[in-house]
Amino acid sequence: MSQVTTSFQRAFQYTLFLSVLYILFKFFSIDAPKGSAFVSYIVPMVLTNVVLIALPVLFVIFYFKDGNALDNIKENILDKHDPEIKNQEMLREYHSMLKEGIITQEEFDSIKKKYLKELHKS
């Protein structure tokens, strides 16, 4: 499931919860209408005060709460605009893999050669 979908689902759940709390608060309010007039009174208030405000705010909070969201945006921008920076980032990643022992020096040298050739082409 994508991060956008997950963030929207969480924001929607919290918005429903806030809506219920808001309805209960208004229901027990002294100046709220009683009976069937309450429904026509509360629906626009819930839509404007909770859904139109809380849902977008909660979505943004949940989306950017995960630190990877900003990294993903940065990565997408780099992929589309500057292949040189992307190659440098990839070389850094492979270098850290070399330091951790995930890849060998020969593998790193071959990868480095490939990325340097791409860098010189552009």
Image (spheres, helix red, strand yellow):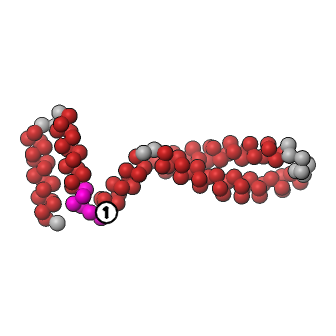
Q: Main secondary structure of the magenta part?
A: helix
Label 1 belongs to which residue? 80
- Which of the 4 quarters of the picture holds residue 100? top left
Looking at the image, residue 3 lies above or below residue 77: above
Which three-letter amino acid code belongs to the residue tagged 1? Lys
Q: Residues within 10 Å of mark 1 (few under 14, many from 20)?
A: few
Magenta-colored span:
81-86
Residue drawn 42% across the image and 49% down it: 69
Residue drawn 75% across the image and 46% down it: 22
Q: Quadrant of the C terminus?
A: bottom left
Question: Helix or strand or loop: what does disc 1 sit on?
Answer: helix
Query: Can residue 76 be seen from the camera position used here?
Result: yes
Residue drawn 89% across the image and 51% down it: 31
Residue 82 highlighted magenta (yes or no): yes
Residue 26 appears at what percent x and percent y?
Answer: 82, 47
Specify whether 67 is left or right of 42: left
Residue drawn 78% across the image and 46% down it: 23
Specify whether 29 is left or right of 45: right
Residue 95 appears at what percent x and percent y?
Answer: 18, 43
Residue 20 appears at what percent x and percent y?
Answer: 74, 43
Looking at the image, residue 120 lies above or below residue 91: below
Of 39 and 31, nearer the camera is 31
Residue 2 appears at what percent x and percent y?
Answer: 45, 47
